[in-house]
Image (spheres, rainbow, N blue to C red):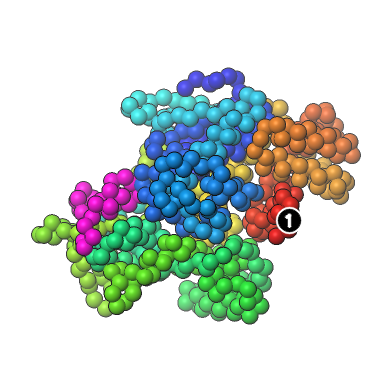
Amino acid sequence: MSRTGTCPRVLIVGAGLAGTATAIRLLRFARRPLEVVLLERRSDYRSAGVAYHRDGNPWDHVFNIQAGRMSAFREDVHDFVRWANREADRRDWPAPWAECEFVEQGPAPRRIFQDYLIDRLSEARREAGPGVVLIEAEGEAVDLELESSVVKVTVRHPEGTHAVLSADHVVLATGLEQREPPFAAGVHAHPSFVRHPYSAAGVHKLQALPPEATVAIVGSVLSAYDSAGLLLRRGHTGRIHLISRTGTMFRTYPGGHEHGVLQLPCPTSLLETYRNREEFLGRVGAEWEAACAVVVRNRPDIDPAVVAERVAKAWEPHLPEVLARIPSAELRSLLDEFGTAIAAFRVGAVEYTMSVIERAMDPVDGPVQLLVGKVEGIAPAESGRLVVTVTTPEEKHAVEADLVVSNFGRESDYSRVGQSLWRNLLRKGIAVPHARTGRGLEVDGHGTLLGRDGEPAGPVSAVGVLREGDEIVRNGRTGAFTFNLAAIKNHSIAVAACAIEQLELRESRLARNLAQFHGHVSNIEEAAPEGYEEAVLLEAKRLATRTRTERELIDAQLGARLRSVGELLTLRLEESQCDRLLRTVVNRAAVERLTDVSVTPRQLRRQLGLANDEELED
């Protein structure tokens, strides 16, 4: 692919949720000509990924969380619900969704999220600044070379040919990698085995199953609920076995639930020296019970069903210091053992999903049965069905089923991922598995890949699940919040802003001046507090603005404010250089404000001056 001009190029590898969100931010943020290439190997995954693509999500699959939390933009919390009610094309929607008035606390079908992202990407393309263009390309990135300040990416096209794309910055947004379950090695091709329940073939097998058939679903977490719920809503009466190693069941969000952030004291005993697992878990249990009791006592307005979620969120700022005291091997082991339980504390599921599951688990006549144990193997039976062997502490079970659905996890250890891209990046040291957790890759605070020496490997950034381990130890994020939409919202902002900053500084040859400039303006808030604060809020508003005309107006106001601030600084720089460096400092502060997770999205809008009159009255 030849360049459209001489402007810089950012190549995004992966056009699912993370890649699309980052592309939207790049198109909105760029003030100078920029070419954004959005590369995707599967056309059905574009603007969707595995979680939201239409073919793998029938209309009964709804978001796990409320529709009001599904906006792609943290600073515009109502955007998705507003789109679904006012902009979505419903001509092909079935009942009851075709007539549904979506509300913040209610459900919404997962498959419409692809249309939402497509519309928002199209809007960002239309409203991009002069010379800022989007190119959507097909192909799979299989290798990457760093050559001076240019990245050469080898792309395998659908027809099997290869080409090399040059880019000034690369963003890796490749999404979830699947772990191949060892217990199913001999039945992958068996007609009664579903390895990919979020695929057209997997959905077809579930929908075509006779209602009296026996089904075994490996897993009892949210993805397993999708498969079970799909069967139950179609009138399934046969036995459905939910087979889980831990037996963890997710809770139902109460009606009217809203996301909230509490301020709780640091669990100080967890900062003591780590001695052993048993002793540490004892301290965790005591601190946890005490914190939950405080919330129950002091906040009777919080539903008991979400107390655990509130405490888990409140502990996030303290967890990095807690985790730093745990040896790496122990930390990995704890995450492996308690990962599912932690995820269940941190998030629940909407009533639409859970009600049908909970009714079907009635011990008297419900068709769904939870079996807690470890799956040892799956093998064909003489009847043509499959037999799932499950070991429990008491005995071994043999579950014979007409269909076995495997929701057995994802691969978070990139040293085990078989894709060519990751084998090559790890071999060259451009990417390094996360040392402390074994989850994701080593990155810095901006999401830039770190090499074996701990230094940035080059102009290559990561978004989404690739940063899982870093989110845990750097930000104290837990469960799915290490890589889900909430994390991606912030990753897309920070990575897009960082990429543009690096390109603009390189173009103006000011990269070396930045550190020195930061030293000169370290007290800028004291020198010009009002001007600086106004500039940061203007920049945050510019970054959050959807239309080109309004962004240009805000940018003009920002330029005037920066000039007045710059006049207070005594620097040996040309005016244009001072403006460029001031913009960088202000942009970083604005990005930090936009990605602040210590407040709710509503609170963020108020802090940034983005809230409308109706929101201010709430």
On the question of residue 190 being in view, the answer is yes
How many residues crowd around disc 1 within 10 Å: few (fewer than 14), some, or many (20 or more)?
few
User: Measuring 22% from the left and 72% from the top, which residue is drawn there?
Assistant: 396
Q: Residue 130, how many percent across, how many down?
A: 65, 25
On the question of residue 49 being in view, the answer is no
Q: Is residue 280 left or right of residue 508?
A: left
Q: Residue 159, how many percent across, how many down?
A: 33, 26
Query: Which residue is at the front of the view, 254 or 143?
Result: 254
Please identify the dominant SS of the magenta region: loop
The residue where tag 1 is placed is 616
Q: Is residue 341 left or right of residue 122?
A: left
Image quadrant in which the C terminus is located:
bottom right
Query: Which residue is at the front of the view, 278 or 232?
Result: 232
Query: Which residue is at the front of the view, 241 or 589?
Result: 241
User: Can you name the residue that lies furthest to the front here?
Assistant: 99
Query: Which residue is at the front of the view, 575 or 531?
Result: 531
Magenta-colored stretch includes residue 195:
yes
In terms of secondary structure, where does tag 1 sit?
helix
**Residue 253 against residue 584 in the figure, above or below:** below
Q: Is residue 230 left or right of residue 73?
A: left
**Residue 370 against residue 433 in the figure, above or below:** below
Quarter residue 192 falls in: bottom left
Q: Is residue 294 left or right of residue 560?
A: left
Quarter residue 550 falls in: top right
| Residue stretch in magenta | 186-213
**Residue 124 against residue 600 in the figure, above or below:** above
User: Measuring 56% from the left and 65% from the top, which residue is drawn there?
Assistant: 257
User: Measuring 28% from the left and 48% from the top, which residue is drawn there?
Assistant: 204
Q: Residue 589, how many percent across, how many down?
A: 72, 46
Q: Residue 302, how many percent across, how many down?
A: 60, 72
User: Measuring 48% from the left and 46% from the top, which residue is drawn there?
Assistant: 113
